[in-house]
Image (tube, rainbow, N blue to C red):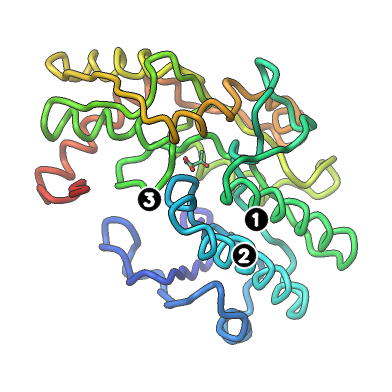
Amino acid sequence: LRERGYDVHASDIAPRPAPSQCSEEVPWHSLDVTDLDAVDALFTQIRPHRVYHLAAILSARGEEIPQRTYEVNQSGTYNVLETCRRLEVSRVIFTSTIAVFGPGLPETVGDEVPLAPTTMYGVTKVAGELLGDYYRRRFGVDFRAVRFPGLISASLPGGGTSDYALFMYVDGVRTGRYEAFCRADTRIPLMYMPDGIRALVELSEAPQSALRRSTYNIAAFSPTAEEIAQSVGTALPDADISFAPDAHRQSILDSWPCALDDSNAREDWGWTPRYSLSQMTEDLVPKIRALIEQNPDAFDRD
Ligand code: AKB
C-alpha cells in the first residue's frame, strides 16, 4: 500500500513487530478490536478512507478458545463495521476463508456453495461476510471480502489448521524433519502470502461498478500434503517429512474444499495468482533460511 502512495497506519493488540515486518515509518496503534470505544477513538483520530480488517483468531486456536474467538472475530467485525458506518469510512476490506465451507462439498467449490462451517472460526467468518453485506446494502458501507485459502509466508503462523504446510518448510530448514498432523492425501487450497496481499490491494482498488458480489473466492494451487512434501524435497533434499494424522485437525481439514472456483474474482476484478507451488518453494526456502540465520528462534514453537 505504501508503494502505491497510500498513507498507512497499522494496528494490533500485539506490540509493534520488528522493522523487517513493519516499517518504522508506519505509525503503529495498539488496539483491541473487541473494544468498541477504542476502535471508535482510533478511527476518529485517524479518519481512514479505507480499513483492512484482518484481526481474527484462526481455526485451530479458535477451537481451544471458542468464546474468545467469538468476541474477536464476531464482535470485532461488528465493531469495525459499526465504526465505519458512523464515521462514513468509504471502504472496508475483510478477510474471509475457506473455513466458511463445511462437509459434503463438490470437488471444486464456487462462491455460491452453501456455507456450513464446523469451527467457531468458520461460523464467525460466515457471519462477518453476511454482516458486511448487510452494512453494504443497508448503510452503503463499501464492504469487500476475499475468501483466503490457507496462506503460507516466511513468518510463524498463528493457530491455523493449514499450518502443516508452512511447518514442512520451516522444520525442513530448522531440523531436517517434520511429522505432519494430517494424512498425506489431504488436499486444500493454498496461497503464497505475496499473492494474498496483492489480492487485498487489487480488490480494494477495483471500481465498485465491476463488483457483482461482496465476497469472492480466490485460488492459487491445491496440492496434497504429499505433493507439498515433494516440493519441499526439491529445495531440501535431506528433509524427512512424515504423516501422523491428528483426528480433530484432520476432520477440520476434511470439511474444507479441495479446490476453489474463483472465476467470479477473475472476471470482476481481474484476479490471477502469480505463484505456483514450485515457485513458492523456490522463493520461500531462502527467506526462511535467512530468517533463521538472523534469529535462530524465529520459528520456535516450543
Ligand atoms: C486456518 O487454517 O484456520 C486458516 C484458514 C484456512 O483460514 N489458515
Mark 2 and mark 3: span between their CA atoms?
22 Å
Residue 255 position within the rendered picture, expressed as x and y whole percent measured from the top left = 58, 29
- Element at badge 1? strand
Query: Residue 122, relative to residue 138: is it above or below?
Result: above
Pick whichever, 206 or 215, lies toward us: 215
Pick whichever, 139 or 122, lies toward us: 122
Callout 2 amino acid: Val
Q: Are marks 2 and 1 in contact (CB under 8 Å)?
A: yes
Read off the residue under disc 3: 158
Using residue 147 as the reference point, say whether residue 157 is left or right of it: left
Using residue 143 as the reference point, say whether residue 194 is left or right of it: left
Residue 187 position within the rendered picture, expressed as x and y whole percent measured from the top left = 49, 19
Image point (48%, 35%), residue name: 150
- Element at badge 3? loop
Mark 1 and mark 3: span between their CA atoms?
21 Å
Residue 148 lies in quadrant: top right
Viewer-nearest of labels 2 and 3?
A: 3
Callout 3 amino acid: Gly
Ligand 1 within 8 Å of the CB at mark 1: no
Mark 2 and mark 1: span between their CA atoms?
6 Å
The numbered dot on residue 93 is 1
Query: Residue 24, relative to residue 267: is it above or below?
Result: below
